[in-house]
Every structure is written in C-alpha cells, then in structure tokens.
Image (tube, rainbow, N blue to C red):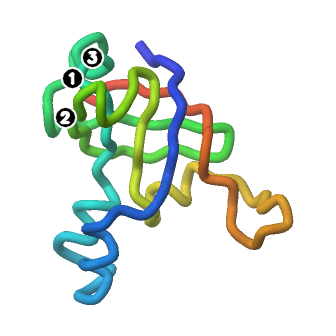
Amino acid sequence: MAETMTLIAGRSSKQGVSLNVSKLEGEYVEVTTTLEMNVADMARLGLQEGDSVRLRSHTGETVLRCKGRKAEDLPEGILFLAYGPSSSQLMGGDTAGTGMPLSKNLEVEVERVA
C-alpha cells in the first residue's frame, strides 16, 4: 500500500566527485538511483536495505533502491534523492522564476515494488 511522504532532492557529496568520471555509469548512477529513507519508515513499509520502491508525484514516477538513514540524519516522513534523471521525473516544469525546477518539499507516494 502506498504512503505519502515528502521528498527533498539535492546534490550529494559523492555525486560531485562521481560527476568527474561519468554520468552514465558506476557511482554516479548508483547515487542518483538510491532513495534515502528513515529506518522507521522503512520498517513500517516492510522494506529492507536495497529493496525497490516506486515514487509517484503529480508529474511522474520512478523506481529506486532504498537506503536506511537514522532519525538524527533524516526525520520520519522525509525522503532524500540526489539530483539526476530519476529526481527529474518527479519534478514539474515550474521554476518559480529561478530557472531550476522546484525540488524541495515534493509530495510523493511511496510503495514497495515486488
């Protein structure tokens, strides 16, 4: 069953290092296709580290691997995803005049993928 949570997309430190190598393989792809989620949220949804989840926004959807984070690193109900093709599928075209699509506080449905 899907649950609604808040997604924050942003740059990760590993992403910046990996960008120098390639956007099409290796660490960059791994970082941009891994959803970070509070371990209590994972437990409630019956998820284990590395399980696949589908995120759906009003704009689109994507399937990602999940990675657990402690409550002091990521509060319950909040998700983090590094910028990349997957996060772009969830953002609309509105830039609020900044030139960058809105990527913070995105409401998404999260569900386990068998």
Q: Are marks 2 and 1 in contact (CB under 8 Å)?
A: yes
Q: Are marks 3 and 2 in contact (CB under 8 Å)?
A: no
66 in relation to 76, above or below: below
Quadrant of the image occupied by residue 48? top left
Q: Decide which of 78, 84 is in the foreground and name it.
A: 78
Q: Which residue is mark 3?
A: 40
Three-letter amino acid code at disc 3?
Ala
91 in relation to 3, above or below: below
Callout 3 environment at 10 Å: few (<14), some (14 to 19), or many (20+)?
Answer: some
Q: Which residue is mark 2?
A: 51
Question: Left of 95 or right of it: where is 12?
Answer: left
Counting residues from the start of the chain, the first of labels 1 and 3 encountered is 3
Callout 2 environment at 10 Å: few (<14), some (14 to 19), or many (20+)?
Answer: some
Question: Left of 28 or right of it: where is 103?
Answer: right
Question: Left of 67 or right of it: where is 109?
Answer: right
Q: Quadrant of the C terminus?
A: top left
The residue drawn where x is 31% and y is 55% is 33
93 in relation to 48, above or below: below
Quadrant of the image occupied by residue 23? bottom left
The image shows residue 67 at horizontal and vertical percentages of 22, 39
Three-letter amino acid code at disc 1?
Leu
The image shows residue 90 at horizontal and vertical percentages of 57, 49
